[in-house]
Amino acid sequence: MRKAEKLELMIGWFHLNFEDPAQSTPYESAEGGYQWIWGGPYEARDELYSKFGDIVSESFIEEAVKEIESDGIVDWAPVHTGDDYDEPEPPEDPISLDIYLDEPSDRYGSLEEQEVRARAREAIDELREALERPRPVGIGHNRPPEERKSRRKSRSFVPPLRN
């Protein structure tokens, strides 16, 4: 991967996770400015070192910081997703199989039970069809093309790579 692409990915990651506090951080001049209710202020340098410090050089991170702070913003807020106050619903415990008896119940064979079975069979059939459908061949199909003779001839025209 080229240096420019790596830099672009690092800067992109930063902007996905941090934003100008003017975007959604409350500002109260009587209280001294931004109210960092979602955390912050964060510095681009610290966050990039934390995320990429083990895999890229310090000068590379400094270059990304220079680009990120080129608009003059040095204090960043986390991107606010809007769902900070909504508690996620806890996952439901799966129904215990102990409630099912080994013998058929009085609902076995009823019209409702037959309809449920028919819907389940339809879903299984749709799944089978989807799995049996041939998938398009593309990148990652794991079947590289066979070697061609004309390709071998063209290799003599390719200059050797130098470091």
Image (cartoon, helix red, strand yellow):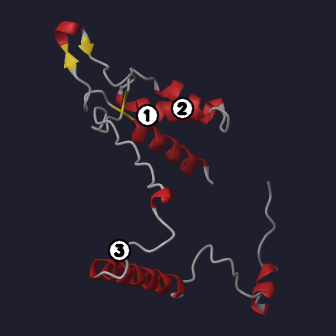
Q: Is residue 127 above or below residue 93?
A: below
Query: Which of the 4 image quarters holds residue 30?
Result: top left
Measure the C-alpha gap from mark 2 to mark 1. 11 Å
In the image as oriented, which residue stretches furthest toward the bottom? 149
Q: Nearer the viewer, residue 59 or 128?
A: 128
Which quadrant is home to the C terminus? bottom right
Q: Confirm or deny contact between disc 2 and disc 1 (CB under 8 A).
A: yes
Q: Distance from label 3 to label 2 (Cα)?
A: 64 Å
Q: Which amino acid is tagged 3?
A: Asp
Question: Percent position (x, y) of residue 133?
Answer: 51, 87
Count the numbered circles shown.
3
Residue 129, given in percent of the width and then of the height, sits at 47, 87
Gap in Å between the C-alphas at discs 1 and 3?
Answer: 68 Å
* First in sequence: mark 2 vs mark 1: 2
Quadrant location of the N terminus in the rendered image: bottom right
Q: Quadrant of residue 17?
A: top left
**Element under disc 3:** loop
In this view, the residue in front, 42 or 91, is: 91
Marked residue nearer the N-terminal end (1 or 3)? 1
Q: Which mark is residue 106?
A: 3
Q: Nearer the viewer, mark 2 or mark 1?
A: 2
Whether tag 3 and tag 2 are in contact, CB under 8 A, the answer is no
Q: Residue at x 51, y 69 (%)?
A: 102
- With respect to residue 137, does 19 lie above or below? above
Circle nearer the viewer, 3 or 2: 3
Q: Give the labeled residue for mark 1.
A: 68
Q: Secondary structure at mark 2?
A: helix
